[in-house]
Image (spheres, helix red, strand yellow):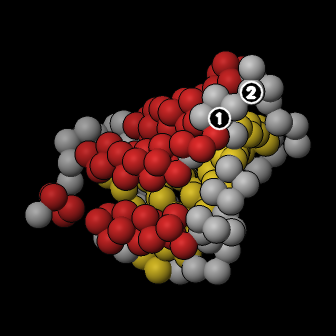
Amino acid sequence: MPYYQSWEEFSRAAEKLYLTDPMKVRVVLKYRHCDGNLCMKVTDDAVCLQYKTDQAQDVKKIEKLQGKLMRVMVSKETRSMAMETD
Amino acid sequence: MVLLENDSFLTELTRLFQKCRTSGSVYITLKKYDGRTKPVPRKGNPDTFEPSDNKCLLRATDGKRKISTVAYSNLLRAHMDGLKKKDKKSKSKKTKATQ
């Protein structure tokens, strides 16, 4: 399971993988404060993409990508359902 | 595995991060969720439920305790903000180390 060296490539591959099968793909984030690193994994249980970092600047990138994937996951209906806002 | 409301999930997640500051990892998993509550039957009548398309499952664990929640579209920003504040603050010692 290789770690990507380039964020650009990882990000592109991750989005592409998600689009092939949204229901199968999951995103895993592992954060270790004691070691000071963050690892992001995107997988559909057949293909596995990973990116690791210890730079604070990458946290934002990882977060943005995760936010983006989240948004795509819930994209069909953008109006919120009645339950949770009350 | 504890299924929580979004707010409680955020609170518990914050607590998880704080607990793991000196040792250990926090794992967060994100996956698209279509609302099914029963496993897919091997044969018989599959798909007797209508899949809904606007939710995702969020799980977090420290290796011992597991928490989860179902997030709808409007709550995503809230989640990401909660996460960001924790990370930025705690990772400040390793800013731009190399180069």
Q: Position of residue B42 (x, y in %)?
A: 67, 70
Q: Residue at x 32, y 43 (%)?
A: B77
Q: Are marks 1 and 2 in contact (CB under 8 Å)?
A: yes
Amino acid at the residue labelled 1: Gln
Q: Which residue is mark 2?
A: B98
Residue B30 appears anywhere in the view: yes
Q: Secondary structure at mark 1?
A: loop
Packing grade of label 2 (10 A; few <14, some 14-19, many >=20) is few
Q: In the rendering, at what x and y percent does residue B57 appear?
A: 47, 58
Q: Chain of mark 2?
A: B
On-image quarter of the C terminus of chain A:
bottom left
- Report, in whole angstroms, how far the alpha carbon at label 1 lies from the one at label 2: 9 Å
Please identify the quarter of the rendering in which residue A47 is found: top right
| In the displayed structure image, the side of residue B59 where residue B14 appears, left or right | left
Q: Amino acid at mark 2?
A: Thr
Q: Above or below — where is B80 with respect to A86? A: above
Q: Residue at x 54, y 42 (%)?
A: B92
In which quadrant will I find the N terminus of chain A? Answer: top right
Q: What number is the disc on residue A55?
A: 1
